[in-house]
Amino acid sequence: MADNPTLTTKKKAKRRPAYKLVQRATNMSAAVSDAFSEIESLAEEMRETYDNMDGNGLGATEKCQAAGSAADALECATEVDVPECLVDVEVHYSESVNVRKNRGPSRAARLSNAVSVLEAAKAAAEEADLVEDAAAAERDDFVSELESAIGEVEGTEFPGMFG
């Protein structure tokens, strides 16, 4: 008896992706400021979640500990000052946008977007043509500070909704 492919395979339903990538561009100053604002907002959310759970006797739960760890990691990132020679450099980056109406991005997607912006800013700074040696030194310091900030927040895990 020959194998009948219609009997052995099931038709898979097509799932729409939850996020789509949108290309954006802005200047270096706005990109860095917006990315660090988002990181700060996430840190505040996680700290508030931790404080509320800890204050209600849930401090020993895995979710509370995960919220505290996420808050600690995100609070370590301090905003990097953009050198004057790079303020107007254009930064191109991709942002994950939720395709479902009336739903914002998850915390993980928001952090991923912020890290993506910082990485794009780092790349744009490295590619910037600078005439003066002093400006090149400022750029190198800026790139180093961005790398450090990215390393502090990248890989931060957020607690799940149900545990």
Image (spheres, rainbow, N blue to C red):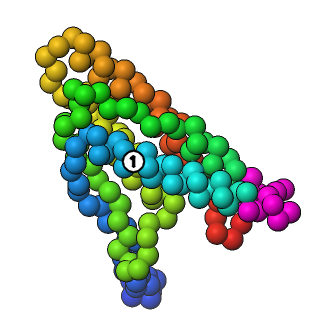
The structure residue drawn at horizontal position 13% and vertical position 16%, both measured from the top left corner, is 131
Q: Is residue 117 above or below residue 84?
A: below
Picture quadrant of residue 89: top left
The structure residue drawn at horizontal position 38% and vertical position 70%, both measured from the top left corner, is 98
Q: Nearer the viewer, residue 92 or 27?
A: 27
Q: Which residue is mark 1?
A: 35
Q: Residues within 10 Å of mark 1 (few under 14, many from 20)?
A: many
Magenta segment: does it hold 53? yes
Residue closest to the far front: 84
Q: Is residue 10 visible?
A: yes
Please provide percent x and percent y for residue 129.
15, 24
Looking at the rendered structure, the secondary structure element under dot 1 is helix
Q: Quadrant of the N terminus?
A: bottom left
The structure residue drawn at horizontal position 17% and vertical position 13%, both measured from the top left corner, is 132
Residues shaded magenta: 52-65
Please provide percent x and percent y for residue 4.
40, 86
The structure residue drawn at horizontal position 52% and vertical position 38%, both measured from the top left corner, is 77
Number of labels in the image equals: 1
Q: Nearer the viewer, residue 43 or 8?
A: 43
Q: Is residue 106 above or below residue 71?
A: below
Please provide percent x and percent y for residue 155.
54, 45
Magenta segment: does it hold 85? no
Give the residue type that dot 1 points to: Ala
